[in-house]
Amino acid sequence: MAKPRVTFVCQSCGAVSPRWQGRCDACGAWNSLVEEGGATGIGAAVARKTRKGRLFALEGLAAVGQEPPRTAVGIAELDRVTGGGFVPGSVILLGGEPGIGKSTLLIQACAKLAEAGTRVAYISGEEAVAQVRLRARRLGLAGAPVELAAATGVEDIVATLDDGEPFGLVVIDSIQTMWTDSVEAAPGTVSQVRGAAQSLIRLAKTSGACVILVGHVTKDGQIAGPRVVEHMVDAVVSFEGDAGHQFRILRALKNRFGPTDEIGVFEMTGQGLAEVSNPSAFFLSGRDASAPGAAVFAGMEGSRPVLSEFQALVAPTSLGTPRRAVVGWDSNRLSMIIAVLEAHAGVRLGGHDVYLNVAGGLKVNEPAADLAAAAALVSSLTGATLPSNTVYFGEIGLSGAVRPVTHAAARLKEAVKLGFAGAVAPADTAQPGIGTPVAHIGAMVAEIAAAGVAQQGDTASHRSQSRRMRKPDALES
């Protein structure tokens, strides 16, 4: 009898190594190689029985295709992210940090569909059935006809779901707890996650049920397991949030049946997750419009315009190397904006600490936020208060030129809807009546600096007048 071959599989990328080593040669991760029996990783040779192929029909590009049917959940923010609802036979990978609200959102979606007449199954590999029922009772959904089970064997799950009337939605919580007999590895390893996902994807394609796989995330926020699982599924959705804020953001990272980078905003309440129909008003609530260093950014999240506030603090430093701290934005982008301001606008920040924050905990990724970040930095440095009814958006090039961005009309329309009367935008996108065209960053810096000087002059005059008014009282006393 041949000795079974032992291999070491990386739990981050799935690469196979014949021996253990501290660092994976493929992805560079440390201490990620785990011993597994059999050659089951990426690149391993697997002996398979060959069979004679069968013929299949080929179609041309001119064939008229129909839009895939969708099942609307009834939760508007969730339907927006998925592209209008769940597509039968599709597989969705949902990732998020522990305790962020993934199970709460899925229980609410399952209850909505079950009450509408769709057969729904919720398979939990981490919690007992009693725990899931307790959560549903707390949310007021105990009466929904959702079918529950606590199981981890993929073969048992597939056999159960194939029996009887077909299901419309199947939730697997989570994919890291599932295991299949076809793979000789421990549950949670790369081989088991890949094998279990493949079996559940085959179930979705053959039965027509929409399968949602819940995935754990790593410390840096990436969905744990091999990246190949993300390529296998039809959609990858991330559930984001901050423990210090009550809102949660559902973001589509990949979607074969809808737009990517679409977001849905929820608010965590005592009765579960509530939809936020107007995220812009939600993120701008409670802002101090009279404080310097605050600029309102008109951004785009997918197809939805969202207004958020950029806050900057520029303070003299006592350190040899000034500190640069940023929350909610790219730190490399901040360094570039600071360099452009010093080189092309005469703004000296080398002796100052710079802190930049996107209020509300929102993460902004688009380069259109360059202009808002620059305006907030200059406002904090000069002490000038930016107009409270003005929004900023535009990309700044290394030459200091302000470049146009996409969806300018939608950004301005959202700003007008929320009561903003002005916009500082690139010259090619500014609209008459609301947009103030800016072709170079130096022009905006000069305007903000002039406003700061005028405001400081008014403040000094007001203080001098106040002292003159108080002087007779002091003399009489």
Image (cartoon, rainbow, N blue to C red):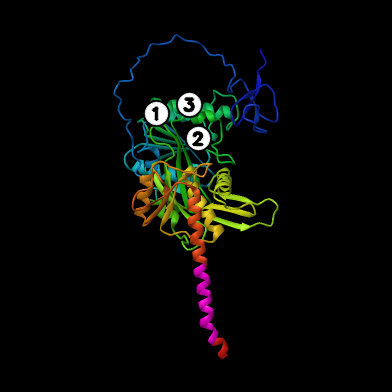
Q: CA distance from mark 2 to mark 3?
A: 15 Å
Disc 3 residue crowd, few under 14, some 14–19, many 20+, Cα 10 Å: some
Whichever of labels 2 and 1 marks the residue nearer the N terminus, that label is: 2
Which secondary structure is most common in the magenta stretch? helix
Whichever of labels 2 and 3 marks the residue nearer the N terminus, that label is: 2
Query: Which of the numbered marks, if any, corresponds to residue 151?
Result: 2
Residue range in magenta is 457-472
Q: Which residue is mark 3?
A: 199
State which mark lies toward you, 1 or 3: 3
Q: Say which amino acid is labelled 1.
A: Asp
Query: Which of the numbered marks, if any, corresponds to residue 163?
Result: 1
Check the image and report above or below for 260 versus 312: above
| Label 2 element class | loop
How far across and down, in percent of the image, does residue 97 sit? 54, 44
| Label 1 element class | loop
Q: Say which amino acid is labelled 3.
A: Ser
